[in-house]
Each structure stands twice: as C-alpha cells, then as structure tokens.
Image (cartoon, rainbow, N blue to C red):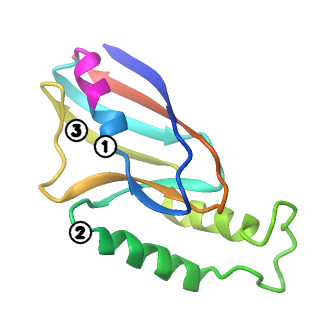
Amino acid sequence: MVFQQVVILPPFERGFHVIDHHIFPLLTKSNIQYGVAHLFIQHTSASLSINENADPTVRLDYERFFNELVPENTPYFLHNYEGSDDMPAHIKSSLLGSSVSFPVSKGKALLGTWQGIYLCEHRNHGGSRKVVLTIYGE
C-alpha cells in the first residue's frame, strides 16, 4: 500500500524549525500500520533533516554554523539574482539534502527519543514550502 500527500508548510523565518506537528497527523491518516515514510522538499533553497528536537539552542547553533560555513556576500558567487542569501541557500540545501526517511509503526514515527524533523529554511524570505510525504507499507 502507498499513501502520498503534498504538505504545504507555512512560511518560516530563516533557521531550523521542527515540523513534526505538520507531518505526524498524516501518518495516522495513511492507515499504514508498518512501513517507511519518505519526505521530499520541492525546493532548492531549503532542506530537510532529522535531529535534536528538545533543546532549541541546537537549532540556533546549526544556523550559526551554516552561516559561517557558507557566508553571504562571498565575492566569487555569481548566482545572486534574488539577493545575497541566494547562492548560500542553494549550497546549504545541497549539503543537508532534500529528503529524509524514517520507519512508521501503527501510525507513529519510530524516531529516537530526542529526534524531530527539521525544515531548514535557508532564505530570509523563503515563503511557503511544499513537502511530499510518501509512505510505503501495509
């Protein structure tokens, strides 16, 4: 059995945001008892990750780290049509990735105790984001 739905996330400010509450209700809706959930973001300037969901300083540290790793206004970046955060957002997205997968059991995500799903918004004004949720199972 396969369940698929596009989730339209509201605009988030630049940074790392736990989006479990947007995704987890759909796991129950899918009626899949055991399987694998796959999330894919349909954008090139935002990404997805699974990481610490309890302490918000982790998300702040991620943002600081990636801003130092890929700084804005780098003189050799040519792709800056949409602002100084344009090319850095694409690089950050490539580094973190456009998808995550996790096991599902009885309509619940089998993530670790402190794990959550992040939307990693790399633009100052990224707008709403579309994420495709596909669950394979029975």
**Which quarter of the rendered picture does the N terminus lie within?**
top left
| Circle 1: residue type | Asp
Q: Amino acid at mark 3?
A: Pro
Q: CA separation, marks 1 and 2?
A: 15 Å
**Image quarter of residue 114:** bottom left
Which residue sits at x=34%, y=35%? 23
* Residue 45, image x, y percentages: 64, 56
Kindly identify which residue carries mark 1. 20
Q: Is residue 80 left or right of residue 13?
A: right
Q: Main secondary structure of the magenta part?
A: helix
- Relative to 130, residue 94 above or below: below
Q: Earlier in the sequence, mark 3 or mark 1?
A: 1
Q: Nearer the viewer, residue 13 or 45?
A: 13
The residue depicted at 83 percent of the width and 86 percent of the height is 75
Residue 121 location (% of width, % of height): 54, 58
Q: In the rendering, at what x and y percent does residue 72 appear?
A: 71, 79
Judge whether residue 98 is colored magenta.
Answer: no
Q: Which residue is mark 2?
A: 55
Q: Secondary structure at mark 3?
A: strand
The residues colored magenta run: 25-31
Q: Amino acid at mark 2?
A: Asp
Left or right: residue 89 versus residue 47 is: right
Choose mark 2 or mark 3, whichever is in front.
2
- Looking at this view, is 22 or 66 the one in front? 22
Which element carries disc 2, helix, strand or loop? loop
Can you give x and y, in whole percent of width and height, for residue 119 in the image? 45, 52
* CA–CA distance in space, label 2 to label 3: 23 Å
* CA neighbours of label 2 inside 10 A, class few (<14), some (14 to 19), many (20+): few
Compute the Cα span from label 3 to label 1.
14 Å
Q: Is residue 59 above or below residue 27?
A: below
